[in-house]
């Protein structure tokens, strides 16, 4: 486009000056202008350094205005390049003021040279179009480049948002279960001597809760769990009853949308967790009702006085829940009622829109919105200027009303078809539609010529640009050239001056390029937005996999250990009460560690200590009556390697506890020069462990080990024992 503007000015100088030296001067000036525009001002992504930029602008000012005195009307439109440049480099208000001033100078100069107001308006509108094209195409190309380069930033932002959601969902799903285990373990420890039956009941409840939590972990590892309000209601009722709380439940509601249901379940869990934290509670009422498009949830319990506290392990749970409820247009109030009872009241409207997802979608699309607005706004303005310029050009040739009317209708239809169909972002064309559109545009372009060959003015550049855009390259260029060639052939009958024909040919070429460029860039912005969304979703999906893997690896062993140690405590209550108390204290510690792991999983990878995991594995296996032998010989390892090996050890021990029926396990970590080998060998393998890729655990470990350049193998040895082996670069 820049070259076309400069070439048109050069040809105009050649025609009007009719001398070699002025033509050579004009060529040098134009080549410098073209180089400055293409190489410096309009290079996408190129940084503009202010001192140098202002110096280059000064050169452009000189070349735009000084030659005008020598070349006259042939040079009068060249300051349009400068007007576009000042919009690019100056602050918005100053840039607009400078551009308007330059256009005013163009209009005044043209009027002084020709004495025709219509000529002055026509030239000014053409210069305005060129100004917008210089600014718009350059800025749009820069925005496309910036959006493409910023795609990873969008992915990181989406991942950060997803991590927040992870933390919230983990809190809702596992917070209640894990927060319950600690107090119940402490209560069972206190009742070992005074009330053994009650202690056994507490231990049985701990086993049930830990197994339920472990099932939740496995569900999350396979994908997010769809919260069932009916199932959760039965679960909390059972949990309250097991804690000797007289619970009365009233559920009266229809099927709720998933986003409403998940929030209601989260509030229900948090409220029950708060009730269970106060051991003096003897009675709890839970009522959920739906009236029209509004759902209410009320939880009332006795035994609470003063300020309502949040249950241990819940953290800022009610604050987070209040935000979630508010995002859905509801209200959550928590606190003691006038009678001193704990009270929770939820009111939430029932809608089918997933507000969270909508907000996320809006935020993802917010970044490229400027590029979209610029592309569509620029097309609207430039195509409208094409129409106005064509009508003014026709008015310079004839004032016949029938010619003006028919031509105006055809050009308006041509511009409307281009703007609202051909150049519309996201439009898709079949082969038949492509040729149909081109045929309609051709009729609108050449019908006025068939009716009024002595006064034909249209916007054939739109047809040329459409061919270039819709057709295959070779065929598109043939059509483009054919349209351009048709212009001088059609106008030679009434356009007497060569400069007029050159102008019309140049205008057709530039219009065709601008039409193609604007349409392509607008389509690129639309496709880039979709690609950015896909990249962000891919990043979120990868983070979900990381999250599920970490959750399985970190919490699987903790919850398995809690279940195992609780079963061991049940057996030790009569034969070794002191050992039973010790196991219960360890259960309390493990449950607290599991709660910490929940928070760590949501925030990112956790740096695990291989030494600590080795001691923990030895303790857990010994508690399961497994004869464990440890052989650890390694030096200082990088954090990534240490964490991966600790994770493999943790998951390997979990598999031993889950699947093995034997009584022996050997664990070794040895470093050989630049490689570290971890091996876990156990006998008595069950059916579930016989495949190297069985279960989420082995697959997750294979992925983890591969990420640090290692290799994981798992399978049966010749003697029937199961061997898990990780070979990792040190």
Image (cartoon, rainbow, N blue to C red):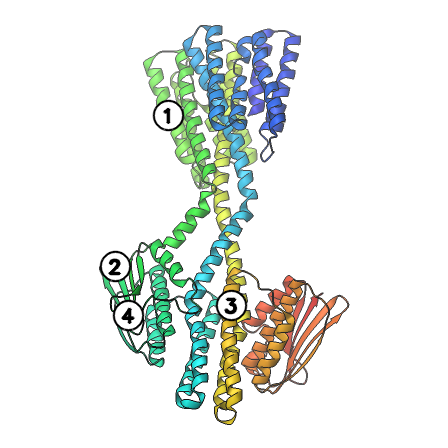
Using the rendered image of the protein, determine whether residue 371 is visible from the camera's viewpoint: yes
Quadrant into which the N terminus falls: top right
- Residue under circle 2? 294
N-terminal of the two: label 4 or label 3? 4
**In the current view of this chain or complex, which residue is farthest to the right?**
673
The residue that mark 1 highlights is: 412
Residue identifier under label 4:
341
Label drawn at residue 596? 3
Q: Work out whether residue 637 or residue 457 is closer to the camera in this orientation and state it.
A: 637
Q: CA distance from mark 3 to mark 1?
A: 67 Å
Element type at marker 4? loop
Q: How many marks?
A: 4
- In this rendering, the label closer to the viewer, 1 or 4: 4
Q: Nearer the viewer, residue 186 or 698?
A: 186
Provide the secondary structure element on which disc 3 rests.
Answer: helix
Tell me the quarter of the picture where residue 291 sits.
bottom left
Crowd around label 3: few <14 · some 14–19 · many ≥20 (10 Å): few
Say which label, 3 or 1, has the lower sequence index. Answer: 1
- Disc 2 is placed on an element classified as strand
Q: CA separation, marks 2 and 4?
A: 25 Å
CA distance for labels 1 and 2: 52 Å
Left or right: 466, with 614 as reference point: left
Which of label 1 and label 2 is nearer to you? 2
Mark 2, mark 3: which one is toward the viewer? 3
Mark 4 or mark 3, whichever is nearer to me? 4
> In 3D space, how far apart are the residues under numbered discs 1 and 4 (Cα atoms)?
74 Å
Q: Give the Cα separation between the discs numbered 4 and 3.
A: 31 Å
Q: Secondary structure at mark 1?
A: helix
């Amino acid at each position: 486009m820049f070259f076309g503007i400069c070439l048109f000015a050069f040809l105009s100088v050649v025609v009007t000056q009719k001398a070699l030296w002025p033509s050579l001067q004009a060529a040098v000036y134009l080549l410098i202008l073209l180089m400055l525009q293409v190489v410096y001002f309009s290079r996408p992504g190129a940084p503009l350094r202010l001192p140098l930029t202002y110096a280059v602008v000064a050169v452009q000012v000189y070349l735009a205005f000084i030659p005008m005195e020598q070349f006259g009307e042939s040079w009068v439109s060249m300051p349009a390049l400068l007007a576009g440049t000042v919009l690019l480099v100056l602050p918005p208000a100053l840039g607009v003021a400078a551009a308007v001033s330059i256009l005013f100078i163009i209009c005044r100069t043209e009027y002084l040279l020709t004495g025709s107001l219509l000529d002055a308006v026509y030239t000014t509108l053409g210069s305005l179009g060129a100004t917008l094209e210089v600014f718009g195409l350059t800025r749009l190309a820069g925005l496309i480049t910036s959006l493409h380069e910023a795609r990873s930033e969008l992915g990181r932002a989406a991942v950060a948002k997803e991590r927040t959601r992870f933390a919230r969902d983990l809190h809702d799903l596992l917070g209640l279960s894990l927060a319950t285990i600690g107090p119940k373990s402490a209560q069972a420890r206190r009742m070992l001597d005074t009330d053994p039956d009650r202690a056994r009941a507490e231990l049985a409840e701990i086993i049930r809760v830990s197994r339920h939590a472990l099932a939740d972990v496995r569900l999350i590892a396979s994908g997010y769990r769809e919260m069932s309000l009916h199932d959760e209601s039965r679960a909390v009722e059972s949990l309250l009853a097991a804690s000797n709380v007289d619970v009365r439940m009233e559920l009266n509601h229809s099927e709720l949308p998933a986003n409403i249901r998940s929030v209601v379940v989260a509030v229900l869990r948090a409220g029950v967790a708060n009730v269970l934290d106060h051991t003096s509670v003897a009675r709890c009422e839970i009522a959920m009702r739906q009236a029209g498009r509004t759902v209410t949830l009320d939880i009332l319990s006795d035994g609470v006085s003063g300020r309502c506290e949040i249950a241990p392990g819940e953290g800022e749970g009610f604050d987070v829940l209040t935000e979630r409820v508010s995002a859905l247009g509801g209200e959550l109030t928590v606190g003691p009622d006038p009678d001193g009872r704990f009270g929770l009241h939820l009111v939430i409207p029932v809608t089918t829109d997933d507000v969270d997802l909508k907000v996320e979608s809006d935020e993802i699309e917010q970044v490229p919105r400027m590029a979209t607005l610029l592309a569509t706004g620029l097309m609207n303005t430039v195509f409208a200027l094409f129409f106005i310029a064509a009508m003014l050009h026709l008015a310079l040739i004839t004032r016949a009303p029938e010619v003006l009317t028919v031509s105006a209708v055809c050009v308006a239809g041509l511009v409307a078809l281009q703007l609202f169909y051909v150049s519309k972002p996201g439009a898709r064309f079949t082969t038949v539609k492509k040729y149909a559109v081109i045929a309609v545009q051709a009729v609108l372009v050449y019908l006025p010529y068939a009716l009024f060959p002595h006064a034909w003015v249209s916007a054939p550049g739109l047809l040329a640009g459409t061919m270039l855009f819709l057709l295959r390259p070779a065929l598109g260029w043939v059509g483009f050239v054919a349209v351009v060639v048709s212009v001088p052939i059609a106008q030679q009958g009434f356009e007497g001056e060569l400069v007029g024909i050159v102008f019309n040919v140049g205008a057709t070429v530039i219009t065709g390029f601008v039409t193609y460029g604007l349409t392509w860039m607008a389509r690129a912005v639309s496709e880039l937005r979709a690609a950015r969304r896909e990249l962000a979703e891919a990043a979120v999906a990868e983070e979900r996999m990381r999250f599920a893997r970490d959750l399985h690896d970190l919490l699987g062993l903790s919850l398995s250990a809690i279940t195992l140690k609780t079963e061991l405590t049940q057996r030790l209550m009569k034969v070794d009460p002191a050992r039973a108390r010790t196991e219960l204290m360890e259960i309390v510690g493990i449950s607290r560690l599991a709660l910490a792991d929940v928070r760590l999983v949501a925030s990112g990878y956790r740096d695990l200590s291989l030494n600590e995991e080795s001691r923990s594995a030895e303790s857990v296996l010994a508690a399961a009556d497994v004869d464990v032998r440890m052989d650890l010989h390694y030096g200082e390892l990088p954090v990534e390697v240490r964490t991966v090996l600790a994770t493999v050890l943790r998951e390997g021990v979990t598999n031993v506890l889950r699947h093995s029926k034997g009584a022996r396990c050997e664990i070794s970590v040895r470093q050989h020069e630049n490689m570290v080998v971890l091996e876990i060998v156990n006998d008595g393998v069950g059916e579930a462990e016989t495949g190297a890729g069985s279960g989420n655990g082995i697959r997750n470990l294979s992925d983890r080990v591969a990420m640090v350049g290692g290799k994981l193998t798992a399978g049966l040895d010749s003697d029937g024992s199961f061997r898990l082996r990780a070979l990792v670069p040190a």
